[in-house]
Amino acid sequence: MAPLDESTEIAELETSGSIAAEKKPISTILLIIAMQTEALPLVAKFQLSEDQDSVFPKGVPWVRYHGIYKDLKINIIWPGKDQSLGVDCVGTISASLVTYASIQALKPDLIINAGTAGGFKAKGACIGDVFLASRVAFHDRRIPIPVFDQYGIGARKTCPIPNIFKELKLKEGKLSTGDSLDMSPHDEAAIAANDATVKDMEGAAVAYVADLLSVPAIFVKAVSDIVDGDKPTAEEFLRNLVAVTAALDQAVTQVVDFINGKFLSEL
């Protein structure tokens, strides 16, 4: 994964890291999942155990589930519940922090950011569709100064996975990330400029940290609500969350099964 306007020097460094990674098949996967409802079915599927001796700093609510699935070491990281309000720690801040800490502690070969997302019917999205993101960007970091504006958008290509697309026949789309569930007129214009099919609250933040630390990342997003539809987003999201999570978990399992035993270049 790389910024769209990276320098040749950075590209060369990332290429050297990719060559090193290609010396062995993928063995350690890090799944970043924002909500407990989304995470627990996969914890059960992969028969993972909750870490009782946390690899994370004392006092943070982050939860790690881990174990062996086929030939893979699987780590699911859920940011946990806000200690004051008791709700899932969604959004870019928690996503950035747990991604950074998890990479440092677990040294994954590959990151999968999985979760539900809003979809746009104008781009062909329907409830329950699962998309793999080909590019990620922010839509709510507005810095109207030359060059800083592009930094704010933070557009990045994701890890190339042509064989996953071919084999699993999942949909491809661009992902736009912001810290609000609803969509302001400013956000709507920015999302359109990002040419996004789906919008979430974590993806581009995970991508930023993964790129910073040179870890390839895949983004699997299941559509829980239609942003440009006629139903209130919050109501539609809550109504569809459980059913759409089942579609998400099926897709993530298919992706993980495909990854098992393969080199990064084979994805």
Image (cartoon, grey):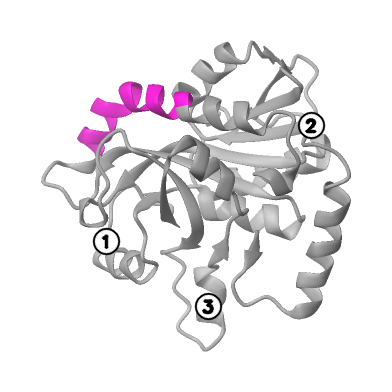
Q: Magenta stretch?
A: 234-250
Left or right? Give the position of 172 relative to 188. Answer: right
x, y (%) of residue 85?
46, 29
Q: Quadrant of the C terminus?
A: top right
Disc 1, SS: loop
The residue identified by callout 1 is 184
In this rendering, the answer to whether 165 lies above or below 155 is above
> Which of the labelled discs sits on residue 27, or is there none?
2
x, y (%) of residue 71?
76, 22
Spatial CA span between label 3 and label 1: 20 Å
Which mark is in front, 2 or 3?
2
Q: Quadrant of the N terminus?
A: bottom right
What residue sits 71% from the left and 41% below the top?
A: 110
Q: Which residue occupies the foreground of this view, 95 or 212?
A: 212
Residue 213's image quarter?
bottom right
Spatial CA span between label 2 and label 3: 35 Å
Q: Residue 203 lies in magenta, yes or no?
A: no
Residue 70 visible somewhere in the drawing: yes
Residue contact between numbered discs 3 and 1, judged by CB atoms under 8 Å: no
